[in-house]
């Protein structure tokens, strides 16, 4: 068995800051959202505006990871009063996925006193991303199992596709992992000291998309921290 071929996935890591901001309002940003569909409003939680966590322009990426080939733009917001726990999209967090950039209008980013510092993001392709131990989908030969962490590495960061960077365990999309949409991991939003954002203590947020019939456009959020 070719273990490497069985486990390898391509991914895109989004570098946060460190270069001049682009002029294009449709560019990818951490900590800023500048577009939404006419008729939409800035999402709220408990009567307060959510914080802009990121916007990702998939149309400008070198490739689109699995289950994202029909998405051109994603915007993600997080509630201002604590991190959500197994709530549906719109309940303390909000992900909006758009299939066509032409349907979007440019808006002035809302100031929410989030403490998240906005930075532009740019993509880097990772050809070889491997699962954390808890996510292994196959049984490994003994000689590989004993040296797995030396041979295969999971790439951390703000990442689309690839394998999730687990902090504690496998992802549980709902209590007892019984989410009705049967989500599968699509991308992750890492904590960023530079941008002033953290999921608990140095945690990672995971976004999944539904696979159950009729629920393919439902999204789920889980997060883990130290």
Image (cartoon, rainbow, N blue to C red):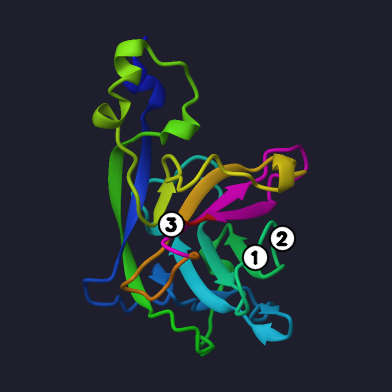
**Marks 1 and 3, the one that precedes in the sequence:** 3
Q: Residue furthest front?
A: 226
Residue at 68% across, 80% down: 44
Residue indicated by mark 3: 59
The mark closer to the camera, 1 or 3, is: 1
Residue indicated by mark 2: 87
Query: Residues in magenta?
Result: 201-223
Instruction: Report if the CB atoms under discs 1 and 2 are less than 8 Å apart.
Output: yes
Task: Give the Cα distance between marks 3 and 2.
Answer: 29 Å
Front residue of this view, candidates 130 and 68 = 130
Q: Is residue 114 above or below residue 181?
A: below
As drawn, is 143 to the left or to the right of 68?
left
Residue 220 inside the magenta-drawn segment: yes
Tell me where residue 211 sits by quadrant: top right
Task: Give the Cα distance between marks 1 and 3.
Answer: 29 Å
Residue at 73% across, 81% down: 46
């Amino acid at each position: 068995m070719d273990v490497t071929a069985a486990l390898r996935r391509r991914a895109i890591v989004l570098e946060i800051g460190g270069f001049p901001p682009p002029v294009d309002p449709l560019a990818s940003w951490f900590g800023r959202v500048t577009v939404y569909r006419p008729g939409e409003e800035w999402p709220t939680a408990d009567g307060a505006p959510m914080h802009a966590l990121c916007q990702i322009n998939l149309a400008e990426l070198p490739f689109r990871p699995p289950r994202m080939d029909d998405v051109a733009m994603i915007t993600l917001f997080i509630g201002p009063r604590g991190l959500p726990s197994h709530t549906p999209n719109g309940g303390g967090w909000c992900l909006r996925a758009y299939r066509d950039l032409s349907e979007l209008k440019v808006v002035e980013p809302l100031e929410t006193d989030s403490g998240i510092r906005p930075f532009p993001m740019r993509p880097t392709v990772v050809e070889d991303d491997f699962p954390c131990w808890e996510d292994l989908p196959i049984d490994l030969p003994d000689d590989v199992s004993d040296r797995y962490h030396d041979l295969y590495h999971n790439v951390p960061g703000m990442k689309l596709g690839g394998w999730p960077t687990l902090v504690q365990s496998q992802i549980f999309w709902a209590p007892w992992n019984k989410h009705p949409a049967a989500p599968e991991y699509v991308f992750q939003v890492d904590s960023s000291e530079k941008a002033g954002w953290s999921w608990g203590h140095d945690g990672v947020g995971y976004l999944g998309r539904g696979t159950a019939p009729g629920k393919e456009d439902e999204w789920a959020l889980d997060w883990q921290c130290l």
